[in-house]
Amino acid sequence: MIDKIVPSLEAALTDVRDGSIVLVGGFGGAGVPEELIDALIAQGARNLTIVNNNAGNGEVGIAALLKAGRVRKIVCSYPRQADSHHFQSLYRAGKVELELVPQGTLSERMRAAGAGIGAFYTPTGYGTDLAKGKETRVIDGKHCVLEHPIHGDVALVKAEKGDRWGNLVYRKSARNFGPTMASAAKCTIAQVYEIVELGALDPECIVTPGIFVTRVVKVARRRQLSEQAA
Amino acid sequence: MSYTKLTREQIARGIAQDIPEGAYVNLGIGMPTLVANHLPKDREIFLHSENGILGMGPAPAPGREDPDLINAGKEPVTLLTGGAYFHHTDSFAMMRGGHIDICVLGAFQVSAGGDLANWHTGGDAIPAVGGAMDLAVGAKNVWVMMEHLTKSGESKIVECCTYPLTGIGVVKRIYTDLAVIEVTPRGLVASRLVPGLTFDELQRLTGVPLLPSGARAAA
């Protein structure tokens, strides 16, 4: 019997090694796998490359991972936020490397990794500082930039519900990078608030099919949703 | 004659009036989000948010915020009846694949040829781009909403951008607190000057040659 459900966050993270490329879901505060990131801090892997839209906010999540000195490089689109002070001080001190990527190119590079695409041309970024040194080509009269896939060793994603085959559904705009990152890593770990019986998720509505998911771990909801928001 | 500059809300109202029924629209973070407050009630307009929302509604009432339902600026929003959620790659396919009819973006500078600079002030500022470059090249119409002049009085419409570029030749129209300026193959065409502002005065304030347009409706 296939059962991708693991009993603990620690058991979920056994594949993270020093130097791993870790894709971390979330956009702002929505869809951030906070419990998995906390467990990653406890697990102790160092010298990590983190791929996320942002570079950590406040004191939790990626910001805490940065503060703990575990991150060698961040690949993201938007590291400059009012409360991203841990990234900012490490970056200014030269202690963390930044690869800044337009958000759609970031997402598409991971999609390409998941879909087995060698590289792709996109008009986004042509003629800008973010395309410096990259190959370009004119396609149908448009200037395009060659972009390469981002393969993760591990992806950490947050979903709402999962089953023992690893099928996932998300909640509202917390879906964001989750499905793409799940497809782009060798090992994808999903934290969910609810584990359901096989067959309970409507097959027409499964967002991430289990083939993209290695392990599922249940976590407790930290914030109770208000009745209106539910 | 004296004139009064438009407030940000007035610029937003002017932009909102120009968005037709049925348009798929992305509003950039910052000033352009004000446009949402002025969309005509009798038109169905689809607001897109880069983080996976189509049919985005206004901010929720206090106490009804949902941490899983936010806009590109990370502020709480709502979903209209008929709205949809989708993942990031689909969302950016909408933006990069030419499916968004209009995007409204803020800008540091726009060049006479429609080059846009809006993501980085250069120097030792920490760079952050978000979805700006994707929208700039992917939306069918890129409209800029900005003040005509910098705080120190320099024209933000320039011959060549001195700030790092977001996209080349992408801007179609510029809405400022003084006028609306179309970027056309024959040059920048100014219309809808604020009441009391002469074309000559607008030209004096603007860093590049302008062409007058027939229309001079009050904003």
Image (cartoon, coloured by chain):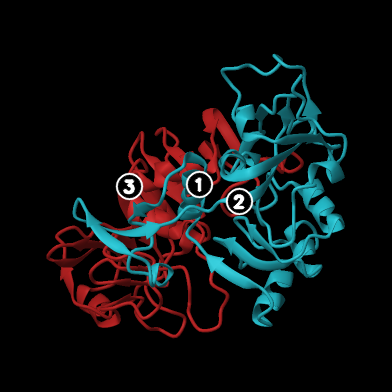
Chain colours: A cyan, B red
Residue A82 in view here:
no
Local SS, label 3: loop
Where A204 sits versus A167, above or below? above
Pointer 3 residue: B18
Mark 3 and mark 2 on one chain: no
Q: Crowding near pointer 1: few (<14 within 10 Å), some, many (20+)?
A: many
**Residue type at numbered disc 3:** Asp
Left or right, residue B186 beside residue B77: left
Which residue is drawn at the image coordinates 79% and 69% (left, top)?
Answer: A67
Which is nearer the eye, A11 or A29? A11
Which residue is drawn at the image coordinates 58% and 41% (left, top)?
Answer: B58
Pointer 1 residue: A113
- Is the C-beta separation of discs 3 and 2 under 8 Å? no
Which is nearer the eye, A117 or B184? A117
Residue B162 found in image quarter: bottom left
- Is the C-beta separation of discs 2 and 1 under 8 Å? yes
Pointer 2 residue: A152
Residue A213 point in image, percent of width and height: 66, 34
Q: Separation of disc 2 and disc 1 at Cα?
A: 8 Å
